[in-house]
Amino acid sequence: PALARCTLVRPGGEVLYDTFVKPPQEVTDYLTQFSGIAAEDLADVEVTVADVQRKLCELLTRDTILVGHSLENDLYALRLFHDRIVDTVLLYPHARGWPHRNGLAQLCASVLKKKLDRSQGHDSAADAAAALQLALLRFTKGPSFAAGA
């Protein structure tokens, strides 16, 4: 998978870093209805994956805890490895077990009782903040909270 955008939020949900990323090859289908990214978003972007990697190395330390949903996909696209990961896919396993996974929108609806606005496609900052909320809820309420969500 190619990286088109990278977003980090602080523990309070405010955006720490957000950038579009220049695709290494020509994009034939932006899948805008899912990605939220259109051709015009990337038209003048000069930031490369290597630029994002350098910036993340400035912002993150060994002790930083990354929280997200299906982070393996993001880290793979970034070509990065990080030891301290909290992934909501693992915190809220699917009721039918592996390999089934709860989607972030479904978890937000069932656990947070709010709907992620997907009318304009994917919003990486909103998704990051939602994953953080889900993780904090699980840590606060304990391992049996929303089991089999």
Image (cartoon, helix red, strand yellow):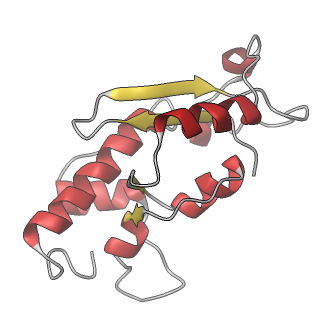
Q: Position of residue 14 (x, y in %)?
A: 29, 28
| Image location (x, y in percent) of residue 98 | 49, 87
Kindly identify the residue that appears in the image at 62 percent across and 55 percent down.
Answer: 75
- Which residue ends up furthest to the front in the rendered image? 62
Q: Nearer the viewer, residue 73 or 103?
A: 73
Q: Is residue 135 left or right of 93 when viewed as pictured?
A: left
Q: Position of residue 2 (x, y in %)?
A: 75, 45
Residue 139's spot in the image, x, y percent?
A: 17, 66
Q: Which residue of the protein is positioned furthest toward the right in this rendering?
A: 25
Describe residue 23's horizontal placement relative to residue 86 as left or right: right
Q: Outermost residue toward the bottom?
A: 97
Q: Residue at x 72, y 20 (%)?
A: 42
Image quadrant assignment for residue 119: top left
Q: Nearer the viewer, residue 79 or 119?
A: 79
Report the residue that reaches farthest toward the top.
44
Nearer to us in this view, 136 or 94 = 136
From the viewer's side, name the closer residue of 4 and 104: 4
